[in-house]
Image (cartoon, helix red, strand yellow):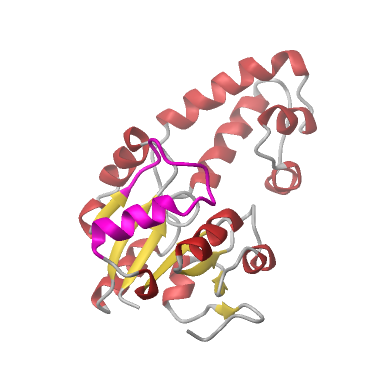
Amino acid sequence: MPFVLLDWDNTLHDSAGTNFAALEMVLRGYGLHVTPDAYRRAYTVDYRRLYRDLGLADELVDEASDRWRGLVAGAEPRLLPGVVDALDRLRADGHTLGLITSAPRAVAERQVLRLGLLERFAACCYGDGQPPRPDPQPVRDLLASMRADPAGAQLCSDTAADMRMAVAAGVRGIGIASFAFDAGELCAGGAVETAPSLHAWVAGEGARCAGASAG
């Protein structure tokens, strides 16, 4: 399949590592110590619950959240291991790459430029004005800008919602396992195959989901 659409956070960019480092620093200021395992167990998109489960008093959550946001905004972007090699191997094999993210353009484009990756993508779809996932419209918009047929495209991402988005858009979902979603959850979301990283998938180390078609 000649078109590969790539999610940004936790597929290419180490957002989880950046977020945890900032959280660890903030909580340390309140005399709390958090380990990566504790963070994984407590993780939820409800940040108030997350802070509470990690031992922070409710009246301190807003202050802590503001500090965390400031640290994340100023953090140097960093790629997950093997990403540059994986992107270059995909392009060398004749794939056209597209970037898709729910992050605002002002945030994601700055990170992509800082890391010197922008020229590797034929088109980018940022989060400004996007409907919530798994609505397939962002994928359809990106495919249209690339003049790509959904049947010839794959979406690599680390969330079950994005796998459902891929199914709805008619593209092949490739689940990249992360701290938040394991292979089983990605398969349940509609992934055709999964891998522990983009680099592993490009190297042929993916595992087909049970019941997935070979197409």
Left or right, 32 with reference to 191: right
Q: Is residue 175 left or right of residue 86?
A: right
Considering only vertical position in the picture, is 99 above or below 53?
below
Q: Nearer the viewer, residue 29 or 190?
A: 190
Q: Is residue 150 left or right of residue 134?
A: left
Relative to 69, does residue 157 appear above or below in the rendering? Answer: below
Name the residue at the left extreme.
119
Residue at the image point whose x is 37% and y is 62% from the top: 5
Measuring from the top left, give residue 76's x and y in whole percent.
39, 38
Residue at 68% across / 33% down in the picture? 46
Image quarter where the N terminus lies is bottom left
Question: Is residue 2 something one can see in this rendering?
Answer: yes
Residue closer to the observer: 134 or 66:
134
Query: How many numbered circles does the render carry?
Result: 0
Q: Can residue 121 be seen in the rendering of this structure? A: no
Q: Relative to 106, say whether 102 is above or below.
A: below
Residue 81 is a magenta residue? no
Residue 180 pos. (x, y %):
64, 52
Which residue does the image show at 70% across and 42% down from the upper left? 43
Q: Between residue 170 and residue 208, name the one nearer to us.
A: 170
Which x, y percent locates residue 131?
47, 41
Residue 63 drawn at (x, y percent) = 62, 15
- The residue drawn where x is 61% and y is 26% is 26
Q: Quadrant of residue 147?
A: bottom left
Residue range in magenta is: 125-147
